[in-house]
Image (tube, helix red, strand yellow):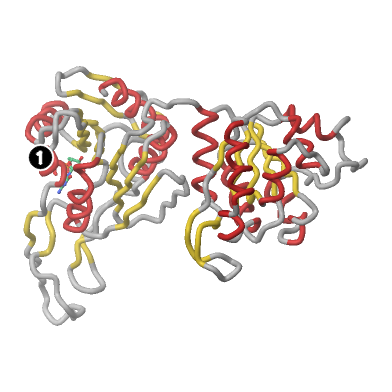
Amino acid sequence: MESRTHIVIGITGGIAAYKTMHLIRLFKKEGCDVKVVATQHAMEFVTRTTIETLSQNPLCVDLFDHSMPYDVQHIALAEWADAMVVAPATANIMGKFAHGIADDLLSTILLACPKPIFFAPAMNDNMYMEPSVQQNITLLREKGCHIISPNSGFLACGSNGTGRMEEPEEIFAEVMELLRGPQPLSGKRVMITAGPTYEPIDPVRFVGNRSSGLMGFALAEAAAHLGAEVTLVTGPTHLQTQVPQIHRVDVETAEEMYQQCMLVQEQQDIMIMAAAVADYTPANPAAEKIKKNDDELQLQLTKTKDILASIGKVKRDDQILVGFALETEHERENALKKLHNKNADMIVLNSLRDKGAGFGTPTNKVLMITKDEQTFESELKSKADIASDILNVISNML
Ligand code: CTP
């Protein structure tokens, strides 16, 4: 997505307006240029300072605001927009647009805008179900508008029913999907493992490794950008992600990661095992903190379940399974062995010999080997770029 997508967000007078502040953030984070047009009533719920700080643009409220830099404001904004999103949309704004009424800045811009228009209704459940409101929504759909239906649940007015504005993440995802067009991984489910695992020795100590989770998180974000619904099963890491299409599942041990992966593996189209899963775990973790009474301490370790190999055993032909291999010697032979032994479709080989590649670094250098032994080599680059390369190879395999 190029960085200058123009979004006009219309805010009308409903309590859900506070959630629209988060929607502005989501579009800004994506690199969009956001301009906000609010009705007078909307300004009862949110402030100019909040909107202007988040959108980094002047807020437009009045039809005849001579301080604004646009020649004819409503025409300028309507032409500037690549899409308009009215959230929350009251019964009033939908009724006005359905019937061609333009009596304030927002309703005037809507009439002048030739680009996709989204409405995210929010109101009391009885109002939402009222026949004239439903007729107006039908009229809007007939005009080609996109209605992002409200959810059911507890409403701010105290009743329980349909009328709660859809969550900002969902509104954002729906708008971006339309603007980006069909993506290579649209409709695909992708599971990614990331990070290290911590295997408890006692309640305060663990056996772990130096994996940061960066590669797995980069893969999750790249897959989401290509349109996939992502399940990210991650071991302990300080990393965060706010991409709406990523469902994050936090785990600690190899066993927990195994359980979570096995729960969802059947529904996945693509599975990428980027986690550095412990191969061994303390056999009998102590229930209480181990005191340093003895000069020596022996830890007995037992093998963990191999998640990649376990999925390799049950996977269907229409599922793509990708493993990682971190090798220090005989890299290629060892990677090929893993590929075949674990029944993967591709293995991504990191070599610790390459400077800047592997654990904890922001960059990586990999060799991808498919099961028919085609190879794709990347140069040293950011993990985000490596993630795109890996997903491009996988998309071509689909
Ligand atoms: N893996 C896994 N479950 C484990 C161990 C590893 O799913 N219990 C996955 C990793 O996520 C990676 C791949 O297996 O995708 C290879 O991991 P690696 O540790 O390099 O290989 P191992 O099979 O553990 O073999 P070795 O440590 O002997 O090299």
- Provide residue 294's location: percent of width, then percent of height: 11, 79
Tell me which residue sits at (42%, 43%) in the image. 245
Tell me which residue sits at (74%, 33%) in the image. 111
Ligand 1 is in which quadrant of the figure?
top left
Q: Is residue 177 left or right of residue 392?
A: right
Tell me which corner region of the image, top left, top right, bottom left or bottom right, holds residue 322.
Answer: top left
Q: Is residue 229 above or below residue 294?
A: above
Mark 1, residue position: 314
Q: How many marks?
A: 1
- Provide residue 239's location: percent of width, then percent of height: 41, 52
Tell me which residue sits at (40%, 35%) in the image. 222
Q: Secondary structure at mark 1?
A: helix
- Provide residue 232's location: percent of width, then percent of height: 32, 47
Farthest residue to the right: give it. 66
Q: Is residue 244 left or right of residue 267?
A: right
In front: 107, or 324? 107
In front: 272, or 299? 272
Q: Is residue 104 above or below residue 205?
A: above
Residue 4 can be seen in this image: no
Q: Callout 1, which amino acid?
A: Val
- Provide residue 261's location: percent of width, then percent of height: 21, 49
In front: 146, or 2? 146
Quadrant location, the C terminus? top left
